[in-house]
Image: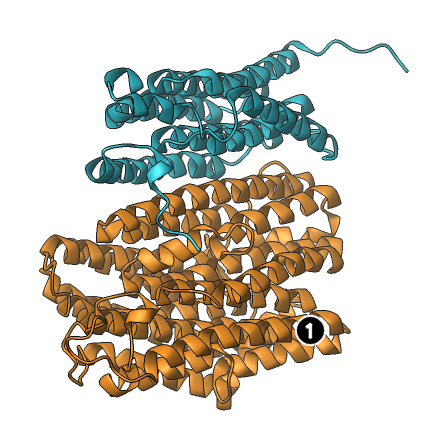
Amino acid sequence: MGPIQAPGAYTGAANVIAVLILLIEFGMFRQALFRDQVRLYAAQSGLIAVLAALVAATRHLPELYALAALTIALKVVVIPVVMTRLAPAAEPADDLDTGAGADIAGTGGLSLATTVLIGIVAAAFGIFAARAVPVNSAAAPTTALAVSLSVVLVAFVLMIHRRDVASQAVGLFSLENGISLAALVVAASLPLILELALLFDLLLAVVVFALLIRLHHGRAETLSTAGLTSLRG
Amino acid sequence: MTAIALALLIAPALAGLAAVWLPSPASGPVTAAVGLASFCLVLGLIPTLARHDVRTLGFVSIDALSVVFLLATSFLYACVGLYSIGYLRTETHTRDHRYDRRFWIGLNLFAWSMLAAPLMGNLALLWIAIEVTTIVSALLVALEGTDGAAEAAWKYVLLASAGLAIALLGTIFAYYAGAHVLGQSYNLAFSPLLSAAPRLPATVVRLAFVLAVLGYGTKVGLFPVHTWLPDAHSQAPTPVSALLSGSLLAVSFYAILRFYQIAAARLGSTFPRDVLLAFGIGSLLLAALYMLDQRDYKRLLAYSSIEHMGILAIGVSFGAPVALAGVLLHVLAHAAAKGNAFMGAGVLMRKYGTKQIGSVSGGLSLLPWSGPLFMIAILALCALPPFGIFRSEFEIVSGGLSAAHDTVAAVFVVLVTVAFFGLSLTANRMLLSRPARAGDSGAVHDGPGRGEPSAWMVVPVVAGVVALLVLGLHPPGELTDLLARAVSSLRGQA
């Protein structure tokens, strides 16, 4: 076994960004306030933009600068602003009704600590699973791919854990961030078409979420999914 | 040829835009006309594509396989366009022009996105088209504005988007595999990927295939990611349910078939077939058992869709040419039969004002046309001869036996029989029982009188029965050629 090589500046930076994105995903478990959760989502999207710019600079792919700019415009500014505007009912602080505060905290089936442990197991699974994939992308290191799979899995755990509509939506958006990360790692010289697919998807998703959240707000006066149980069998 | 493809891509979108400005009574005939025109255009594609391989124009690419799915979608588009005219006219309690306008805009855009998906010659564009179908159909599911519709639309959009995110991950891995061989400027076009398939890295292809089956499988309604499907199908406006079940599920299955082609070319057929078999048997088992105990007839039909999607997956897993031809025929026959069943269910809803099976009785004597037609649709769904599904399931089972999958074929027949009991017993209870008299607790909506709510809601169903009979008794030679060519491309002999 030879001496372990220290990673280069680019690889190191990419790995650090990927790990920060994963940590933010875990941070979302902790946040009980919807507003804070959206802030974390914005920060996570900002990191994606930084990584895109980094890949653009090291690999001379100017279209990725455009991607980074689009990511900042949409995921850091527009979507968080729209989400906070649309979902004031999800804010327990504004709501004196004691029921609303419990809504965002979780399904109630499992405690927060247990869910975080499940999230850690999911993240570990993602990292080990990525080992099986012989991806040696020149653009970004394998570690970042492993972490991106973990982000996707942890986002699923988060979506299962949350029981209000708005923060399930934030969970879905952060899942898309995990996929953006994977796209940057696996296919940095990705044709712009796939990146457009990502942003396009997100934009349309916001339209639908906005409509649905409105619909919910008008009907049920709460964003909790606890009332969404009439259809079964 | 290229003109037809462009017309299919443009006309439904224009009809959707026109519905924004047109008064809603005019949008109906426009939609029906565009639907019929699309169906005729696709019929015109059959002879050409039965003889030629892939035709490509920029990002548009058509081959025999895509025509099969275009045929199913355009047929239902035409039928549902006609049917919806009557469906909206008989809407009694909430006569709202905004509702009508949104309905027509949504219906046309939904059909447009489903016609666009099989025309895309690029895995990324295919993904976008299927994502657009989700967006449009989720809005249509929410259209009724009830609590149930909001709940169903929310589950649908959340689960389908999460599923499509997984499918996108699969697409990204497919890109990686392609770029490995075709170079960094590779743009995810399908034909070069398929011809380079034998040289792709095996593990990455395997990963991409499993992610694609799970991701697109969410929209197909395969077990265990089917949970949105019964809710959305039961809460959507009934014409939309017909499109959801007959063509949306099939179009998503088309995406799986594209990944299947690549995976089979690289990994051999064993691995992809095993994956599809597991999903297929699970779906068939779940659906057959749930169909035995349903109280809502639209949910019953939704579980029947899960059953039939399971049948498609099992048919592909058999792999024999006969079974694959059966699968493609099944796509067409299921579109006609399930479209008919949902359209019949819409008539029952208008007549009785309820979706509860227990509140519907005497359908056969109260509805002189729709009663027998609904019965025929149910019998066709149960794969009774002489309808198209009998032929397709017969081919699938004989393909399974010829490929030495005896056990699976036997399980298949048993589960399909269980589903037959579930569907036919319920239909008997609703149609053959004595009609409830006026003043009974289950009094009918229109009064107990005999009669159809609207002739518009009968004509397209008759067309569906004709299609089922043609497919079952004697499929035209050109259609058989088309299916044969699609089968050979699925078997990697294009």
Q: Residue furthest front?
A: B440
Marker count (numbered): 1
Q: Quadrant of residue B366?
A: bottom left
Residue B90: x, y in percent? 15, 70
- On screen, B335 above or below A104? below
Nearer to me, B395 or B9:
B395
Q: Chain B: give its colour.
A: orange
Q: Residue furthest right?
A: A1
Q: How are the colours assigned in the image?
A: by chain
- On screen, B419 above or below B188? below
Is B412 on the left-hand or right-hand side of B121?
right
- On screen, B359 above or below A168? below
Q: Chain A: give its colour.
A: cyan
Residue assigned mark 1: B409
Q: Is residue A57 visible?
A: no
Residue A121: x, y in percent? 65, 26
Nearer to me, A218 or B252:
A218
The quarter of the picture where the C terminus of chain B appears is: bottom right
Q: Residue at x 35, y 20 (%)?
A: A34
> As shown in the figure, which amino acid type bears the numbered disc 1?
Ala
Q: Residue at x 63, y 76 (%)?
A: B413
Is B408 on the left-hand or right-hand side of B304?
right
- On screen, A100 above or below B294? above
Q: Residue at x 13, y 69 (%)?
A: B89
Q: Quadrant of residue A70?
A: top left
Label 1 chain ID: B
Q: Quadrant of residue B321?
A: bottom right
The quarter of the picture where the N terminus of chain B appears is: bottom left
Helix, strand or loop under label 1: helix
Q: Residues within 10 Å of mark 1 (few under 14, many from 20)?
A: many
Residue B458: x, y in percent? 25, 81
